[in-house]
Amino acid sequence: MAIFSDDDLDRLRSYYPERPGELSHTLTGHPLLTLESLVELGKRLPRKSVEYNAGDLPYGVDPDKVSHTGLSVEDTIRGIEECGSWMVLKNVDQDPAYKALLDEALNELAPVIEPVSGEMLTRVGFIFVSSPDAVTPFHLDPEHNVLLQIRGSKTMMIVPGEKDVVPDEKHEAYHVGGHRNVPWQDDYEGRGHKFELTPGDAVHVPLMWPHWVKNGPEPSISFSITWKSRWVYEEADARGMNHLLRKWGMNPASPAAFPKRSAGKAYAYRALRKAGVLPKGA
Ligand SMILES: [Fe+2]
C-alpha cells in the first residue's frame, strides 16, 4: 500500500516549497514505529543520535536552560507516559530498516519535489517520542520536512520566517553553528498556521519557517522525513558569506528567496573555505 495518496501528492504540489499544509499518510501502526521497536532502535543508534530533554518548557526557551531528565534512552521511551520528556532519534536512516522506510516515503514524494527543487539530497529521518503535554520550543530547521503523526495528537504552530521573527543575523549565526531555537512572542500566533495532528495526519513544514510543537494528552510518536536541495546548500553558504561580510563591517543584502539563486556569494564562501582561510566560527 502506498504511504501517500494521489490526493496527497496533488496537495503537496500546491504547497511546495513555500507554504505549510496538511497531508495524510498510511504509516500509522507500522511495526517499525511502535514504542517497542523504538526502544530497540534507541539502543542501536550512537548516543549522539539520541537527544532528550524535559518536556515542561515554555514555547520560547534559552537552550542553556533546558534540563536533562537523567534517565537512560530506554527508560525514557518506556516511561514516556509519565516521565514528562521529549526525545528525538536522529538520523534513523543509519539503520538499514529505517533507511528503507524513509526512502519508500521520499521516493513517493520525489515526482512532486524534484521538478521544483531538483534532486532530493541528504535524505534524513527523525523520530520524535514525547510525553503528554510535552513542548518542543520554537525553533527552525535547515531542511525540507514532512512530519507524519503516528501515535497520539499534537498541535504544531508554524510561523512565516519573516525578518522580524528570524532576523538575518540569526540565520547567519545559525549557519555558522548557532542554536536553532528562536525567541517566541505571543503575537506571532495571529500570522501563524496552526495544525492539529492526529494519527494518519502529516504536515509540510517549509524550509526555515520556525515552529513550536505541543503534545496532546497521550504519548506521541512522529516521524519526520527530510531532504535538502542544491538551493538549500547555496543559501546556507550565502548566509555564511553574509556573516563574514557583516563581521567586516558591511551590511549585506539577504540571500534571494526561493527559487532565485545566490550563486555568487555561495561560490565566494566555498572558495574561502576550500582555501582554508575562514576565521574560526565562520
Ligand atoms: Fe522542527
Image (spheres, rainbow, N blue to C red):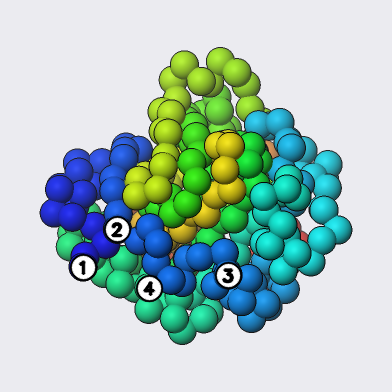
Q: Secondary structure at mark 2?
A: loop
Left or right relative to 145: residue 65 = right
Query: Quick check: marks 4 and 2 in contact, CB under 8 Å?
Result: no
The answer to which quarter of the image holds residue 203 is top left
What is the secondary structure assignment of the residue under circle 1?
loop
Residue 193 visible (yes or no) = yes
Residue under label 3 = 36
Say whether disc 1 or disc 2 marks the residue closer to the N-terminus. 1
Side of 73 relative to 28 (left or right): right
Does 84 appear above or below 165? below
Q: Which amino acid, mark 3?
A: Glu
* Cα–Cα gap, marks 1 and 2: 8 Å
Mark number for residue 1? 1
Q: Residues within 10 Å of mark 4 (few under 14, many from 20)?
A: some
Label 1, label 4: how far apart the Cα atoms are: 13 Å
> How many numbered discs?
4
Q: CA distance from mark 4 to mark 3?
A: 17 Å
Distance from Cα at disc 3 to Cα at disc 1: 23 Å
- Element carrying mark 4: helix
